[in-house]
Amino acid sequence: MIDFYYQLRQRMIGIMQTSLKQIRQVLGFGVQEFGDLMGLTRQTINNIETKKNTMSSIQYIAICAVIDNYIKDKPELLRVISTILCSNEDENAIKIFETIENGSLLKKWFMCFPDESKICSFLTDTTQVIVNEDFNNIAENYRIFLDETVLFEDDFLIAIQPLALALKKSGNKFIIPLKVIEAIQHQLISSDERDVNRAKNGMKLLMSMQNDKLVDIRGEKTDVNIISTFTSVFAKFKCSNRLAIITCDYNLAKQILALNNDAFGGFNILVLKYSKDNGFQKWEQEDLFGEGKDQSIQINGNNKLETEDDSIAGLKGWEIID
């Protein structure tokens, strides 16, 4: 199943393949000599360097082993190799090879296989409370969605800062469906002053996150309303990505948690709520599937404000969420 770390490893392989010829030449190896060190033919090395064939993970590990062994005797070349690798990375992405732990490319590779017990520790925590220590794991391993109800919450901008910092560090962003933006815009023209003030706070928070490049707004013309958009997107991607949502909407939380049924397969979805008094907590099954009161704050498709897809520059759809 595809997750954050799988994508990271694939990026590493792609960067190494693009950089291989330069690195081989810096190390002073001919094509034949380099291939012999890994038990690969001259033709295989040529095909990798010219991108006729895609580098495999096994080939990547073998190449890293050769590089690691060579720079033990010539550590001054580590910075040169790091510079080559960084120069072939996407200029808009976090530089993966800017640091190479203990001078070992192999160690960096194996660090991209996370400790599942750490990732899932907060999932089994019976206190249901998400603490600051959990935010790094969530930011690194989950695609995090927000709805309008949490954007309306008092002090959410302050409370979200530890998670926002962790997202920046990991190169991740919050995903917000276009229907959520439309819901906030619709509430701005409400006759209820309290609703208008909440919507203004939500827009202020959105603009702040956009300025910090922490927001990825997605949407398609076929999106019907907020709940159906979230449920269809989560059902589509839960088998390939770890997903999380922060919402104060009872009905939405219930619909999303229902997708964790074993029949759907994939990763369990992390469903969180926020309040000024209690901070971040997991929605509890008994609250949602018992005889609980409907506490949703829902704006559905019947009250939508029409928004053209091109009104937000670079709007992406739901083909992929990586």
Image (cartoon, helix red, strand yellow):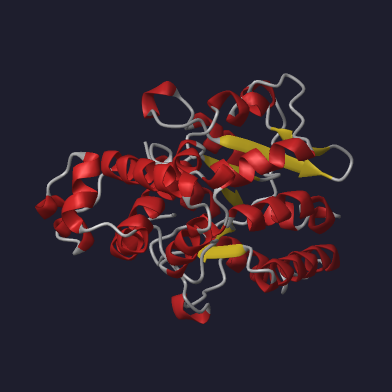
The quarter of the image holding the N terminus is top left
- Residue plotted at (39% across, 54% down): 11
Residue 229 is situated, as x and y percent measured from the top left of the image, at: 47, 52
**Where's residue 184, x and y in %?**
67, 66
Residue at the image point whose x is 58% and y is 48% from the top: 144
Which is more toward the observer, 271 or 140?
140
- In this picture, residue 227 sits left or right of residue 9: right
Asked if residue 147 can be seen in this view, the reply is no
Q: Position of residue 138 (x, y in %)?
A: 63, 41
Based on the displayed image, in which of its 4 quarters is residue 288 positioned? top right
Q: Nearer the viewer, residue 4 or 31?
A: 31
Going by the picture, which residue comes out furthest to the front?
A: 73
* Residue in the image at 16% along x and 43% along y: 40
User: To which quarter of the image does residue 206 belong?
Assistant: bottom right
Q: Does residue 125 show up?
A: yes
Q: Find residue 194 and report its image quarter.
A: bottom right
30 shown above or below 264:
below
Number of callouts in the render? 0
Quadrant containing the C terminus is: bottom left
Q: Is residue 2 above or below residue 53?
A: above
In front of the other: 259 or 52: 52
Q: Position of residue 166 (x, y in %)?
A: 68, 50
260 and 170: which is toward the camera: 170
310 in relation to 8, above or below: below
Q: Residue furthest right?
A: 277
Going 22% across and 61% down the picture, which residue do you hit? 49
